Structures are given as C-alpha cells and as structure tokens.
C-alpha cells in the first residue's frame, strides 16, 4: 500500500495517526500528548521534559528528508516513521543520533521513551550494523 | 559545482501511457548539509517542471546501504548541475531545460 503523500509532511495514508496516538497515551512514561499541525506532536514525559515529535509516512526517510523536516518544522526531538511500507536509512539514523534526535518506527520509540537519552536507542540489528560500520 | 544524478523507475518507465506518476530518485553526493540542501533544491526544480513526479532522495552512501537502484531496477535518466549559485541545469536524456530557483 502506498503512502498517501509523497511530499512533505508525508501525510498518513489513512488521514490520521490514531495508532500512534493510542500507543503513546497508553505508555506509562507519557503524561500528555498534544497534536499540532503537519504530523507534529508535543509529548510530555514523566521525566518533566516536552518532546517535539514529528510522525510521517515517508517511503525512504534519509538525511535530506531530515534537513527538509527541520527547515519546515524547526528543531525536533524525534521523528517517527509510521507505516510498515516506509523506512529510514541507517545514515539518517546515525545523523539524527549524532544530533541527539531520535529516529524510530513506533515500536522502537515505545522502547526508547523510558530512557532519558531516548534518542540513543538502537535495536539489536541496528547495534550490529552500527558496530560493523565503526559507528559505535 | 554540484552534480546529482536522476534515476527513473516504476511503471512510467514500463508503460508510460497508463502510469499515474513518474517515479524518480535523486542520487546526491553525501549526507553533509550542503549536498542534502542541493538535493532538496533539485527536488523542487524537478517538481516544478514535472508535477507528476514522485521523488525520492538518497545520498550515494544511503543508496549503497539500501541497494535501491538495483532493487527498483532504476535507470539513469538525467543529471542536475548547479551551474550558478542560484540556478540549476537539468539535463534529461530526452529533454533539456534550465530552471532558476
């Protein structure tokens, strides 16, 4: 199934991000979630911080798309790739991580959210690839 | 001067008469800011000249990681040069146009 929109903000095929919203609201570390425009959310954590989170359905989210997202939305704390048909590149993950920005799918974000330095979270396969590339 | 390659893939390059969009990949040099912003300018220029374009962007390292060109059976259809500071020269195998952005 294709993503609905191939241009920024790579809107949801279904016109909403309810699955993401439900997962966030049931996460025990999330105290509030506020939807803004263009897939942008403000997410408050028990840690006391407020994260600017951008969610999208970009087929192939690379470093250039991260620059585009930043240009149009301002600084972000996390970018979430919503659809199973979409993905991000390891280079984009590395670039975001170096800037202390999280780049995740929803499952990864769920796992990372409890960590104060959530942006650093890597799945086991990612750890292996990052180590093989000499990035860790 | 910066250069990006444009690859075509998908239905337009198989059966153009029935394709709804034109799938293109912009392949740019690196993941540094200058190269990425050049790729974004290329994307804007391509969309201006061909609104049906569905454009993806990858640096050479990202393409190597994903193997996108081989997987999508994409083929080179053009190049884009930053001829001057504020202009792009778009050269397609069949078309040639200059876009000032």
Image: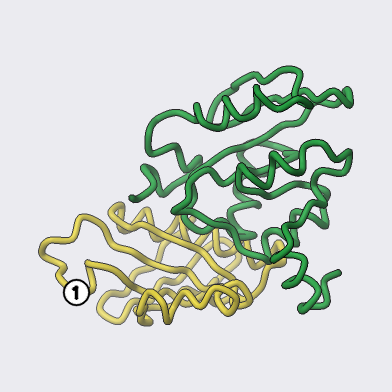
Chain colours: A green, B yellow
Q: Residues within 10 Å of mark 1 (few under 14, many from 20)?
A: few
Position of residue A66 relative to residue A80, above or below, is: below
Number of marks: 1
Considering every residue shown, the one lying at the far left of the view is: B17
Position of A6 with respect to A79 (left or right) is left
Q: Is residue B83 visible from the viewing direction of this image? A: no
Which residue is painted at 85% across and 40% down in the image? Answer: A115
Residue at left offset 30%, top offset 81%: B93
Disc 1: which chain? B
Q: Position of residue A116 (x, y in %)?
A: 89, 38
- Return the x and y of residue B60 as percentages of the image width and height: 59, 77
The structure residue drawn at horizontal position 87% and vertical position 44%, both measured from the top left corner, is: A117
Q: Is residue A45 visible?
A: yes
The answer to whether A68 appears left or right of B53 in the picture is right
Horizontally, residue B10 falls left or right of residue A83, namely: left
The picture quadrant where one finds residue B24 is bottom left
Percent of width and height locating residue A20: 56, 32
Task: For mark 1, give the secondary structure.
Answer: loop
Q: Residue at x 82, y 71 (%)?
A: A135
- In this rendering, the answer to whether B28 lies above or below A105 is below
Residue picked out by circle 1: B14
Counting from the top left corner in percent of width and height, residue B37 is at: 62, 59
- Camera-side residue of A102 and B3: A102
**Residue B90, picture quadrant:** bottom left
The quarter in which the N terminus of chain B is drawn is: bottom right
Above or below, B49 against B77 in this view is above
């Amino acid at each position: 199934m294709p993503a609905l929109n191939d241009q920024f903000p790579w809107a949801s095929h279904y016109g909403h991000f309810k699955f993401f919203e439900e997962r966030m609201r049931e996460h025990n570390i999330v105290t509030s979630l506020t939807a803004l425009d263009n897939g942008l959310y403000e997410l408050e954590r028990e840690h006391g911080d407020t994260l600017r989170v951008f969610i999208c359905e970009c087929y192939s989210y690379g470093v250039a798309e991260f620059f585009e997202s930043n240009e149009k939305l301002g600084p972000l704390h996390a970018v979430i790739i919503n659809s199973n048909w979409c993905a991000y590149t390891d280079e984009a993950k590395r670039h975001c991580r170096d800037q202390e920005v999280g780049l995740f799918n929803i499952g990864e974000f769920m796992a990372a959210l409890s960590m104060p330095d959530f942006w650093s979270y890597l799945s086991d396969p990612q750890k292996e690839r990052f180590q093989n590339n000499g990035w860790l | 001067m910066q250069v990006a390659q444009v690859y075509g893939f998908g239905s337009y390059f198989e059966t153009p008469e029935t394709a709804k969009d034109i799938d293109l990949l912009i392949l740019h040099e690196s993941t540094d800011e200058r190269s990425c912003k050049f790729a974004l300018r290329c994307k804007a220029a391509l969309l201006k000249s061909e609104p049906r374009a569905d454009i993806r962007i990858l640096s050479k390292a990202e393409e190597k990681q994903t193997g996108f060109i081989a997987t999508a059976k994409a083929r080179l259809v053009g190049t884009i040069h930053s001829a001057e500071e504020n202009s792009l020269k778009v050269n397609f195998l069949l078309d040639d146009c200059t876009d000032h952005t």
